[in-house]
Image (cartoon, helix red, strand yellow):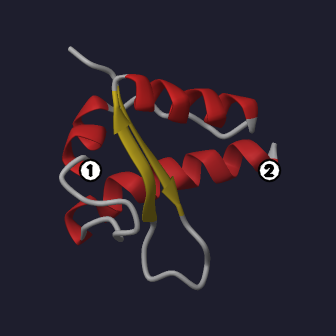
């Protein structure tokens, strides 16, 4: 099974988190490497990444995924406060 990666970004002025990059195989590896190099939190969640692969870069995440993504963002935010 090929590795998959989806990068999300959320800014206060956005209505929801946005997909900024996604990829499978070598592109997924590049996304993950860039995240590591830039100290961006990586959350391994196969079900979430599978669901997000149906959308395009630039799209807002669908409303059905708000809750799970909000939990991840809250966790990441808390990590940066500690």
Rendering coords of residue 66 (x, y %): 33, 64
Q: Which residue is mark 2?
A: 81
Q: Which residue: 38% across, 60% down?
A: 57
Marks 2, 1: nearer the viewer: 1
- Of the numbered discs 2 and 1, the one sitting upstream in the chain is 1
Quadrant of res 64:
bottom left
Image marks 2 and 1: residues in contact by CB distance under 8 Å: no
Q: Which mark is residue 52?
A: 1
**Which residue reaches farthest top?**
1
Q: Which residue: 48% across, 54% down?
A: 8
Please say if 77 is above or below 26: below
User: For this view, does 75 lie left or right of residue 80?
Assistant: left
In the foreground, 27 or 42: 27
- CA gap, disc 2 and disc 1: 27 Å
Quadrant of res 39:
top right
Quadrant of res 23:
top left
Please say if 60 is above or below 44: below
User: For this view, does 4 lie left or right of residue 50?
Assistant: right
Rendering coords of residue 67 (x, y %): 33, 60
């Amino acid at each position: 099974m090929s590795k998959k990666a989806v990068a999300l970004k959320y800014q206060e002025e956005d209505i929801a988190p946005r997909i900024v990059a996604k990829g499978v195989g070598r592109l997924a590896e590049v996304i993950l490497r860039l995240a590591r190099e830039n100290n961006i939190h990586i959350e391994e969640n196969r079900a979430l990444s599978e669901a997000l692969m149906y959308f395009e870069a630039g799209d807002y995440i669908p409303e059905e995924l708000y809750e799970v993504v909000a939990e991840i963002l809250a966790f990441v935010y808390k990590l940066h406060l500690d």
